[in-house]
Amino acid sequence: MKVLVPVKRVIDYNVKVRVKADGSGVDLANVKMSMNPFDEIAVEEAIRLKEAGKAEEVVAVSIGVKQAQETLRTALAMGADRAILVVAADDVHTDIEPLAVAKILAKIVEEEQPGLVLAGKQAIDNDMNATGQMLSALLGWSQGTFASELGVEGDHAVVTREVDGGLQTIKVKMPAIITVDLRLNEPRYASLPNIMKAKKKPLDEKTAADYGVDVTPRLAIVKTAEPEARAAGEIVPDVDTLVAKLKEKGVV
Amino acid sequence: MQYGLTDEQEMIVSTVRSFVENEIYPHENLVERTGEVPKEIADEIKRKTLELGFYACNFPESVGGAGLNHLEFALVERELGRGSMALNHFFGRPQNILMACEGEQKERYLMPAVRGERMDALAMTEPGAGSDVRGMKCAARRDGGDWVVNGTKHFISGADHADFIIVFVATGEDMTPKGPKKRITAFLVDRGTPGFTIRDGYKSVSHRGYKNMILEFDDCRLSDAQVLGEVDGGFDVMNTWLYATRITVATMCVGRARRVFDYALTYSAEREQFGQQIGKFQGVGFQIADMITDIDAADLLTLAAADRLDQGLPANREIASAKLFASEMLARVTDAAIQIHGGMGLMDDYPLERFWRDARVERIWDGTSEIQRHIISRDLLRPLGA
């Protein structure tokens, strides 16, 4: 079985995000970019499936700017076998919307015929949480979202999903789309031998046009704003005052 | 000139940095408080480093290392320099002088060191022989076919965890026009050899937990099989392998300085006084400007020196300049970071007071600033007959 893992280049989770002065988006100039952490978990899971003998090949895909090549190299250094880069934008500030990404992925799936697509549940830059679901709809494949556990048994995948109020375990027929949640695994560091090997692994470069997908945005961003600053707290002398204050505010 | 790093080098940097942030930082306060690295933590760091293929990454592939070049190894050590030396000691980087091992020594010392099975340390300094290495009193005399060693070494980092130690010992004296000159030989000495004791050294303000040990030799009997290099050839192995270790100090100073800088930068942007962020005051903003300029300069100087080694160019002076500048830069940067933090900078709630203390030794060990200036100036003036 082949596993396809879409990975997105996003602003590093450690970076303090700054909104552009004109409110049109987030400033990405000279900002550290990394692989979307949920995608890293997906790559890790795919590699584990390979190590467990349940997958033969792990293919990483990234759709976006040319610099996403670095993100793919990271996936290769972690242990993916080869990569496909789909250049769909020139400006790092251009975000390809989930539907366009899903359409391109659907074409790649047709070509590659993976048994499983393992994706992050969402990208940490815009938190859309849509690509996996859209891909599933486009392909007519089963989906298991928010996976915190994954087992592959024959032609079925058993997925434990993190849902409101608890865990739900479902069994889906493969091929399937699984989107992964935070607790599925802890991604490995790239080992030094794998880092050195990553450059020699194949990385195919394509464009959105190669797949005949129009990536023109359908959504207009009206405004991007910083979250409101937290109001200053108040230090109270003792527990009694704390309780009185909380009662006063109607919290307890 | 090429200034950018390759994709592989970028990945090496980001992997080692993540490793230090996730595997080293969380244990730092414990080590600082107790002055010890618990065995479980040491073993875990070592195991993970081995798994990642970074253990002994400075050794060539022919002996099982990763074969990084000097520049790449400098990048690894630069990132390690961010973290505690006591802890990152277990991100093993055996002394590359072990490449001088011959015959059976390879299986007994070199290979186990590269595989992480045996740890090494290096002993040169004595109470009476610091910068003046040739002034060493620790001496070996011939007795039958063996050597009998007597004397003391101190400030021996890593000896507490070492399974064997590379010890430089006087093995005779030559008369020269400038007076008597000692002949030096390097020996591989196993822990537990009769007559050889390793004991705790002094309590240092810098790098707590990265202990300096005292070695005592009392009629310690060694064989010729334990000589590293040639008899009386200690200076040759030293000159072949050790001068590059000063790059380690320089790179680690740069890594540490970048970590310190991040604290100063964040604090300057968050701390408010007189109704605005203190970074908006020129007095602080300009300090930030000077700090990053200082750090970038040291970084480039260091990487350029490492790159010269890779190109096979003479680099002794350049390495000395890098070690001198980077260690003095770290002193300025840690001091400025504390100034920006004000009183809080001195409290152990922040690691800044620790960085400041740690920085002090960098201008002393592996050749003091004065020795580096001597190397640089002699390199330039000697050819002119001055």
Image: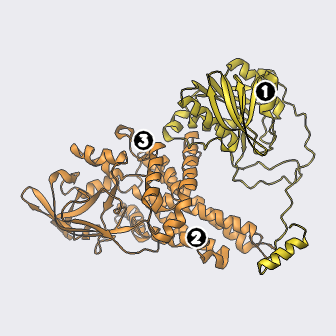
Colour assigned to chain B in the rendering is: orange
Quadrant where the N terminus of chain A is found in the figure: top right
Name the residue located 72 percent from the left edge and 26 percent from the top edge: A172
Expressed as whole percent of the image width and height from the top left, the position of residue A44 reads 61, 37
Q: In the shown orientation, is residue B17 left or right of residue A120?
A: left
The alpha-carbon separation of the residues under discs 3 and 2 comes to: 34 Å
Which residue lies under the disc numbered 2? B334
Q: Which chain is indicated by disc 3?
A: B
Q: Colour of chain A?
A: yellow
Few, some or many residues within 10 Å of mark 1 (<14, 14–19, 20+): some
Q: Secondary structure at mark 3?
A: loop
Q: Chain of mark 2?
A: B
Between B334 and A96, the one lying in front of the other is A96
Vertical order, B186 against B33 (above or below): above
* Residue B318 is at least partly visible in this image: no
Q: Tell me the distance, in whole angstroms, between the alpha carbons under discs 3 and 1.
A: 45 Å
- The tag on residue A222 is none
Residue bearing mark 1: A136
Helix, strand, or loop for circle 2? helix
Left or right: B364, with B284 as reference point: left
Disc number lying in front (2 or 1): 1
Direction from residue B93 to residue A166 in the image, left or right: right
Q: Give the image location of residue B214, x and y in percent.
A: 30, 70
* Residue with the mark numbered 3: B67
Q: Nearer the viewer, residue B373 or A126?
A: A126
Q: Is residue A244 visible?
A: yes
Percent across and percent down for residue A218 are 90, 33
